[in-house]
Image (cartoon, rainbow, N blue to C red):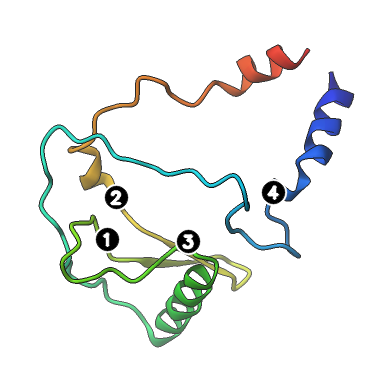
Amino acid sequence: MKEKLIHLLFKYKDAFATDKEPLGAIIGHEVEIILNVEKPYPPLLSRPAYPECPRAREALEVHITELMGLGILRKVRHNEQVEVTTPVIITWHNGKSRMVGDFRSLNTYTIPDRYPIPRIHEALTQLS
């Protein structure tokens, strides 16, 4: 089973981000995510900003520029009804940082998916 998994991972190695190949879209395997909502949610285009130091602001700009370059983030037009959150920079002990956002308010408006992502144990069992 281990050999099958390794073979599968190597076969689809282009689907994984590495240090040399950053996170981005897999050409030919784009997925459109559509939210099912019970009721329309109000656009939350303005949220109070969290206090941040100048170093965190610089890191935030770097992360946003990188994600926009990869096509993961895009600018929002003023008339779009979208969920927006205030990004926060988390700095690790080694000086690296990552950007996170809190979208918990969006969960109150979404209907749970009837077809959840399969459990990893079940998927691996099917490989054998």
- Going 49% across and 26% down the picture, which residue do you hit? 117
Please name the residue that numbered disc 2 is placed on: 103
Residue 16 is tagged as 4
For label 2, the SS is loop
Q: Amino acid at mark 1?
A: Thr
Q: Alpha-carbon neighbours of circle 3 within 10 Å: few (<14), some, or many (≥20)?
A: few
- Going 23% across and 72% down the picture, which residue do you hit? 49
Q: Amino acid at mark 2?
A: Phe
Spatial separation of the CA atoms under disc 3 and disc 4 = 15 Å
- Going 72% across and 62% down the picture, which residue do you hit? 21
Marked residue nearer the N-terminal end (1 or 4): 4
Q: Give the image location of residue 39, x and y in percent.
A: 10, 37
Marked residue nearer the N-terminal end (3 or 4): 4
Marked residue nearer the N-terminal end (3 or 2): 3
Q: Are marks 2 and 1 in contact (CB under 8 Å)?
A: yes
Q: Give the image location of residue 28, x and y in percent.
A: 61, 48
In the image: residue 76, left or right of residue 44? right
Q: Amino acid at mark 4?
A: Phe
Spatial separation of the CA atoms under disc 2 and disc 4 = 25 Å
Q: Amino acid at mark 3?
A: Ile
Q: Are marks 1 and 3 in contact (CB under 8 Å)?
A: no
Spatial separation of the CA atoms under disc 2 and disc 1 = 7 Å
Residue 67 or residue 92, whichever sits in front: 67
Spatial separation of the CA atoms under disc 1 and disc 3 = 15 Å
Is 67 located above or below residue 12 in the figure? below
Q: Are marks 2 and 4 in contact (CB under 8 Å)?
A: no
Q: Give the image location of residue 60, x and y in percent.
A: 43, 76
Residue positioned most to the bottom: 54
Is 30 located above or below residue 93 in the figure? above
Please name the residue that numbered disc 3 is placed on: 72
Marked residue nearer the N-terminal end (2 or 1): 1
Q: Are marks 3 and 2 in contact (CB under 8 Å)?
A: no
